[in-house]
Amino acid sequence: MIAKDLISNEIPPVKTSDTGLEALNWMMFFKVSHLPIVNNEEFLGLICEDDVYNLNNPDDVIGNHKLSLFMAFANQHQHIYEVLEIAARLKLSVIPVVNDSRLFLGVIKMVDLLHEFAKYSAIERPGGIIVLEVHENDYSPSEIAQIVESNDAKILSLYIASLQNSSRIEVTIKVNVSDLSSIIQTFRRFEYEVKASYLEVDKQDDLYNSRYELLMKYLDI
């Protein structure tokens, strides 16, 4: 999935002939804090709420003012992971998409971006999640996959995150099974630190119900 495949036609760009008040009204209507400014298909940058509030006269056309335009955009050929990185790093509410000539093609809504990312992350597929903490020098995706597969399971997605002020990393694994006990035991046998694990909701409810029933039986004795 690349940027041009995620473009939404719901949110129009702001033109230099539009007023600051019109831009602010569009932001409020679409519940975003940024909008692209376009002049004859040329992408000029992003206008934000602060730009409008800083105008002396919000009823004046935007083209009459020098704005602190935010030059943030994605090229139409960039992968969804790159688009998500841009949005997260710059804290954007919309991501403008341009072609190789820097002409405006449209915007990507954050909700659409997250929805597509969920598909890539296998979030919608049933299974369980295991979070490991390892030293970055000990990180071996092949060994982690081997441990999971030795327990008749498959990795659906795997992500790593650096821990602040540390040489250790956090590895989050989504697997295609809900019973994680054997996988966790194997990780611990290989001296992995299992930081957390999460069962599928319905399995977790079954676990709590069975423990409750055991407790009730015990109290009846």
Image (tube, grey):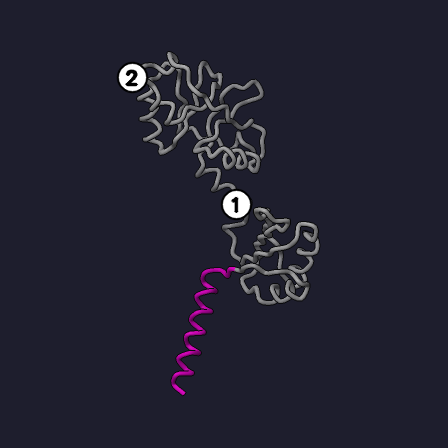
Label number found at residue 119: 1
Residue 128 location, x and y as percent?
A: 54, 58
Please tell me whether residue 201 belongs to the stretch shown in magenta. Answer: yes
The residue at 48%/41% (across/down) is 114
Residue 134 location, x and y as percent?
A: 64, 55
Image quarter where the C terminus lies is bottom left
Q: Which residue is mark 2?
A: 59
The residue at 30%/19% (across/down) is 58
Say left or right for 65 vs 153. left
Q: Nearer the viewer, mark 1 or mark 2?
A: 2
The residue at 60%/56% (across/down) is 132
Whether 107 is drawn above or below 139: the answer is above
Please tell me whether residue 181 belongs to the stretch shown in magenta. Answer: no
The residue at 35%/34% (across/down) is 31
Q: Which residues are magenta?
A: 198-221
Residue 72 location, x and y as percent?
A: 50, 26
Whether 151 is drawn above or below 100: the answer is below
